[in-house]
Image (cartoon, rainbow, N blue to C red):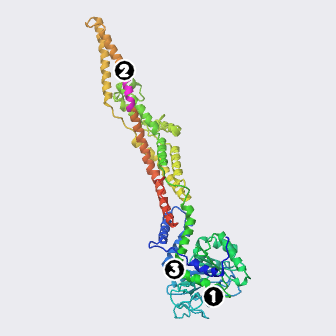
Amino acid sequence: MATTRPSPAARDAAPLAGLARPRTEFPAADPLAARIDALGELLGLSRTRISPDALAESSDLLARVGERRRLSTDHTVVALAGATGSGKSSLFNALAGRDLSRTGVRRPTTALPVACAWGTEQATGLMDRLGIALQDRHTGWNLPETASAPWPGGAGSASRGAAHFSVGGGRETGAGLADAKERSLDGLVLVDLPDHDSAATEHREQVDRLLRLVDVVVWVLDPEKYADAALHERYLRPLAGHADVTVLVLNQVDRLPGDAAEMVLDDLRRLLDEDGLAVGEHGEAGAVVLASSALTGQGVGDLRAVLAQVTAERAASGRRLAADMDRAASSLHPLYVGEGGAGLTDPAREEFIDRLGDAVGASGAGQSAERDWGRAARVACGTPWSRLLTERTAPGGCSRSGRKARSSHVRVMGRRSRPTWGFGAGAASGKGAAVAAAAGARGRRSGPAGAGTASRSAVAEAVRGLAADASRGLPEPWAQAVREAARRGGEELPEALDAAVERVRRGRPERPGWWSAAAGVQWLLTLLALAGAVSLTAVLAGWLGWAWWLPPAMIAAGGLGGPLVAVVSRFAARGPARRYGQAAERRLRDAAADCGRARVLEPVAAEVMRYREVREQYAVVAGAVLAPRSHSHE
């Protein structure tokens, strides 16, 4: 990042200007609280869908946020972190005004965190949370002391109370001073951490633990290690979103000759820019970069002013928690945000229902019902001798005097057609035709009462297609949950379809009145033909004095009228037969749709709805509002 070297006056004012920039305060309805509540809801809704390992970091954050918000918000916890030999302990002592943290050439020197607090009345809970030992807790006073002031309650505690230490190096002369360098450090809890690159593993673990708990981190760098890859890759780059609560101090600048300090600072800003850590200069938002020397005191006053400004705002803890929430939302993004829209669309639902109808042979069953109805109409409206011939040659028919022969042709049709209701031969069409034929053969072998059977392969394919449509665009954990819900429902769906087909199997159709009228006309025409034959015999024998042409006319009228009535009835039956077949198909499709909705569609829709709920919660966690999607339906 190209940087223009500021003037000395601008350099003195830059740190304070960056911290004095206008801050957006939380309104009465705290958005951070809303984000925290949403994170709790999000984790609660996700525990059975996402692995605990994937949610562990967010669960830990939720616990940390709750702990921090229950403790004093009037205190700001600031940690001095740095590498071995960076001089952070010396800088800590310079800020405290006395030697509280041990320094020396032995490395590592700081083995345990040391804390100094200005205003200790409510800081005890914060110290306990940080795990600071009692002997390592100290109180800041208004004048530098030569001896350490022990923490109240610790060994050798003095009951002198807390006082204000002037950040400008002198005593305060009044409250509310305009110059930030003269502001009090009251409310500051300053912690000196062990070295983050210490050879001792427990030291590094303490640093990592405490860096998650403090409000502000002051990274103390030295001219030799400011570009250390471990520092940038392990800490600064992952915490790039915490720029508002980050201060970087290039210490030991007294070791740099001439303008070398400015060159190192420019290079440090370049590295920070590569890390994605925004640097706030001249009133801009971002991290503060300072130069100091704990040995000569150069820049220590500027750092005190920065800490005084941060402490006076009483907002650092909220900014830190908000940055933690942003980081958690970024890590959770792949688990809750997929590609494109998600949901059960109307076309996907309709396709699934249609495929279930095909699986139970609804279309073929409707065609079969139409043919059976037309056949029954032809029998009922045909000539008496054609009905007699049909009864004698019908499958399973009895003799002319048998019971079945005397029963209605419609009823015979109803009993005879039962095996073809679901998957009878010729009843199936489309992709499940071969399986349907086999199922129909199985039904015929089981006798007239055999029930149709849904095609297992067609049902499984329909379920897989629905699961693929519903899970498309979902993050993998939620896509897997949708597929699992569809699979569970699909396991029992074929049996449920069989039972539904059995329940809605068509019964005997109602006998239309015009069938009886046509049958009556057929009998009259038959009687007319018989009467003509008898009359013709009587005329020829001389027993009857009719004109010779009248008996043949009666025979012709009766013999030709019957077939003519049958033909007319056949054409008249086409419309009712079609409607009857459509009604049979519709009943079967409705039954299959009810099974599909109860077993598959509703569980899948519930999973999609659950995802939409957690997606809305995630939007709150991420600090955004998702627009409603009109193309998806639950």
Does dot 2 land on a helix, a strand or a loop? helix
* 101 is higher (above) or lower (below) than 363: below
**Is residue 447 among what the camera can see?**
no
Residue at position x 63%, y 69% in the image:
276
Give, as a three-letter code, the residue at label 3.
Answer: Arg
Give, as a three-letter code, the residue at label 1.
Answer: Ala
Dot 1, crowdedness within 10 Å: few (<14), some or many (≥20)? many
Residue at position x 70%, y 80% in the image:
261
Q: Earlier in the sequence, mark 1 or mark 2?
A: 1
Q: Which residue is mark 3?
A: 314
Q: Main secondary structure of the magenta part?
A: helix
Q: Nearer the viewer, residue 455 or 2?
A: 2
Percent x, y of residue 91: 64, 85
Q: Which labelled disc corresponds to residue 94?
A: 1
Q: What is the count of numbered marks? A: 3
* 567 is higher (above) or lower (below) than 27: above
Does dot 1 land on a helix, a strand or a loop? helix
Task: Indicate left or right for 48 with 168 as reference.
Answer: left
Task: Indicate left or right for 95 with 46 as reference.
Answer: right
Q: Earlier in the sequence, mark 3 or mark 1?
A: 1
Q: What span is colored magenta in the figure?
A: 562-576
What distance separates the C-alpha of mark 3 from that of mark 2?
Answer: 103 Å
Give, as a three-letter code, the residue at label 2.
Answer: Leu
Q: Earlier in the sequence, mark 3 or mark 2?
A: 3
